[in-house]
Amino acid sequence: MNRNSLVRGGTVVTPTRSFRADILVRDGVIAAIGTDLTPDQESTVIDATGLHVMPGVIDPHSHLWESGFMSGPDFRDSTASAVAGGITTIVEMPLTTPEVLDVEVFRQKAALGEATSYVDFALYGGVRPSNLGDLEAMWEAGAVAFKIFTCDTGCAMHGVIDDADLLAALETIAGFRGLAGFHAENNELMVANRARIDRDGRTDNAAFNEWRNETVELEAINRILFYAGRTGARVNIVHVTSPNGVAMVADARARGVDATAETCPHYLYLTDKDIEERGAWVTCSPPMRGADAMAGMRSLINSGAIQTVGSDHGPVDPALKRRGHNNIFEGQPGMPANETMVPLMLNLVASGELGLERMAELTSEAPARLYGLYPKKGAIEIGSDADFTIVDIGRSWTISADNLIGKTGWTPFEGVPVVGAVAKTVIRGAVIAEAGRPVGEPAGARFVPRQ
């Protein structure tokens, strides 16, 4: 695969400005940025005329082959959909089979990814109360963060539910200056809510929203931020659903707590009414809130209060969704989302709700900095990896499973009209996907350890 190339004729987008330039790539690394550059003799010319060249999009929240999903035993399917959707690097969560709870499994997963992934990738480690002694070894092996659930997961990771365990986990991670990424839901409130719902004999779609209501999320965020402040730990609250949650993180940051907030496209496009109407097909944890919350999240996305956007990609087998037809609790939560993340964000650019330069920060530079990958990833700078998401910001189309390649064969955004599409995905100087389809088979993907 030729990693020498010249990206010619495009408008380069960075978090601070957009400008017309060519980009010369040697051995997969940016060698020069300028106008009317001449390609080396062995270079492939990548035509970006009329297109915008963004720093390669990083998906900081990806589940590739979680138990109960349908991606298969390796990285192939979900990274094919990622690269088709313009993503050049994923940050993969630890809920695999087996869960990533020690350095041996961590290294096995990195090797599997290098053999079967279309995109470069970084890895989380997992946390349960009994593996705190294993965390630093994973950090030294290149883990970018550690996933902590404050509710029961139903798997070997289990939730770090008790206050004493949560405090111990954050003290441990703070001890080597690690990063904790939190799924924030209060387990005790969820148990009580579910008991009440079950007593009432309810299995309707709206019951899902009541089970995992906003109070469940906000209480957990509040507790995490309190213990982060007491321990000095760095914390990232993933998939924040509402302006109330974002405000809690912003208030903590103002007090000096090292905290960040991630949200996802589904909180910018879907609401609790979608769950009531469409059922398990659009359930995720935590679920979408009301229309006012969605509008508020859209208003915040350009403000800097939200640091990163991740897909929370979960490629659930449609058969597992159909189980929730008559009982919402029987459906498997999670949604395929990495193939549609970039177009949905570009659509917010087209509507004027998000600046293109701000999108480059949200989806490239900020996650690269947060996870210790910058400036190797997330930048269009000399010496950085030549990762580019080349987009057509004016193309109008309608999202449909018929247009997508994910193995699940469905999308929660079916029928959503968007303006903005991915034209080419370039990883370390080579075109890996074009016009929504991968080019060739997985070859040469790299595990990217924390720098």
Image (cartoon, helix red, strand yellow):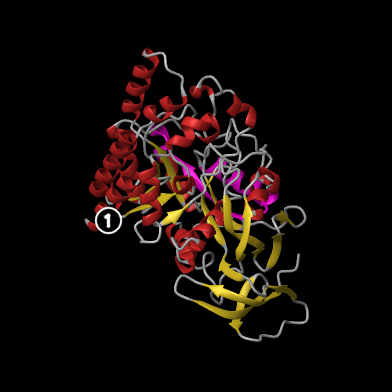
Secondary structure of the residue carrying numbered label 1: helix
Chief SS of the magenta region? helix
Residue 114 visible in the shown view: yes
Inspect the magenta stretch and tell me whether residue 126 lies in it. yes
Residue 409 position, x and y percent, is 68, 39
What residue is shown at x 43% (from left), y 47% (from top)? 136
> Would you place residue 20 above or below residue 108 in this image?
below
The residue at which mark 1 appears reads as: 253
What residue is shown at x 58% (from left), y 80% (from top)? 20
Along the line of sight, the residue nearer the viewer: 393 or 48:
393
What residue is shown at x 26% (from left), y 43% (from top)? 227
What residue is shown at x 55% (from left), y 52% (from top)? 341
> Would you place residue 202 above or below residue 382 in this image?
above
Q: Which amino acid does label 1 sit on?
A: Arg
Q: Is residue 111 left or right of residue 233?
A: right
> Would you place residue 433 above or below residue 281 in this image?
below
Q: Quarter of the image for the N terminus: give it.
A: bottom right
Along the line of sight, the residue nearer the viewer: 29 or 265:
265
What's drawn in magenta, residue-wise?
Answer: 103-132
Residue 134 position, x and y percent, is 45, 41
Residue 284 visible in the shown view: no
Residue 148 position, x and y percent, is 41, 39
Residue 36 position, x and y percent, is 66, 86
> Would you place residue 78 above or below residue 274 in this image?
below
Inspect the magenta stretch and tell me whether residue 222 lies in it. no
Q: Is residue 127 left or right of residue 104?
A: left
Crowding at dot 1, Cα within 10 Å, few <14 / some 14-19 / many 20+, comes out as: some
